[in-house]
Amino acid sequence: MIPRDLSRRRALVTAAGVTAAAALGTTGVLSTPALAAPGPVSPSPVPSGAAPNSEELKEALRRLEARRRRVLTGRHSENGWEMQKVVDAEGDIVTHSVPGTGLTVTARSGDVGTVLVHVIRRFHYEVDALGLPGEPRPLEGWTKPSEVRDSRLPESNRASGTAVVIRPGSYPAGARGGFDAAQLSVIRDILADTEGVVRWGGDDRRPQEGLFSLVVRPGDPRLAQVAAKLRDWDRTPGLGAGTVADVNEPARRRRAARFS
């Protein structure tokens, strides 16, 4: 029979480990599949229903903390999302294919990536084709947090994987007039697709007309709702990116005006 004080001590250690693991989970690292299942943490697995011992808990928490240090920064970009240090390696920022363009972009996985890829695709189909032969840097996504000069500026959102820049060499920061009236109408229609979840850098005080950035904060239900709608459009013939719409149709113009 296990002495009462030893049994109680084991329960306390287990509870402390669970609490610490939950605290790490709130950082966002454990929400990533690669981190949620980091593999075995000891040579012999713990039998089902058995409490892990203190050494196993220490090792599991040590690995989680090491992964957190490799991935996270503790710094947030302008829109409130945490900047991350790596791409395609344990974190939330991954390389996305942009269907129909032959291009890729680095951005957050899940709903964020769904929304930003939709913006890029519609730009490619309806504003100006991207990735022309010999074109340098048609598209940029994530950037290293160390390259962020001011986390209060919308361009810092790239470091959290929540913004993309289209043709950074063609639409320099601080310059206006990169698009004609017809192109601007399409851009407004694209923003209306996102229902205010994405902001165009051309509307900022210091414009950056190639920048499209998430404006909602983590956990905002509007992001999931918009992403679900866009995924549904992609599965439905006649909807979604690649279906050229009449952006001058009165109902669409009224819709676009709501998000201008």
Image (spheres, rainbow, N blue to C red):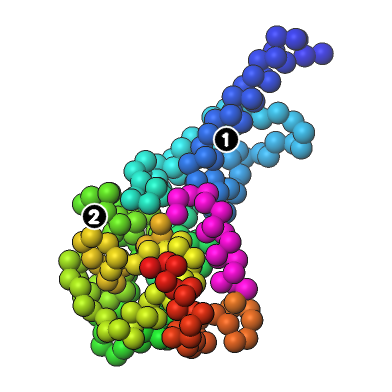
User: For the residue marked with disc 1, what is the amino acid?
Assistant: Ala
The residue at the far left in this view is 174
Residue 226 visible at all: yes
Rendering quarter of residue 135: bottom left
Local secondary structure at mark 2 = helix
Nearer-the-camera pick, 11 or 244: 244
Q: Which residues are magenta?
A: 216-232
Judged left or right of residue 231, residue 118 is: left
Nearer-the-camera pick, 199 or 50: 199
Q: Residue at x 76, y 37 (%)?
A: 48
Q: Residue at x 30, y 84 (%)?
A: 181
Residue 121 visible at all: no
Rendering quarter of residue 216: bottom left
User: For the residue marked with disc 2, what is the amino acid?
Assistant: Glu
Judged left or right of residue 175, residue 24 is: right
Secondary structure mostly seen in the magenta stretch: helix
Circle on res. 22: 1
Q: Residue 228: where, in percent of width, then height?
A: 60, 66
Answer above or below: position of 248 versus 64.
below
Q: Residue 158: where, in percent of width, then height?
A: 34, 59
Q: Residue 85: where, in percent of width, then height?
A: 36, 52
Q: CA distance from mark 1 to mark 2?
A: 31 Å
Judged left or right of residue 230, residue 162 is: left
Answer above or below: position of 74 versus 226.
above
The residue at the far right in this view is 1
| Badge 1 or badge 2: first in the primary sequence | 1
On-image quarter of the C terminus:
bottom left
Circle on res. 147: 2
Q: Residue at x 77, y 33 (%)?
A: 49
Rendering quarter of residue 172: bottom left
Answer above or below: position of 124 versus 214.
below
Q: Residue at x 47, y 75 (%)?
A: 254
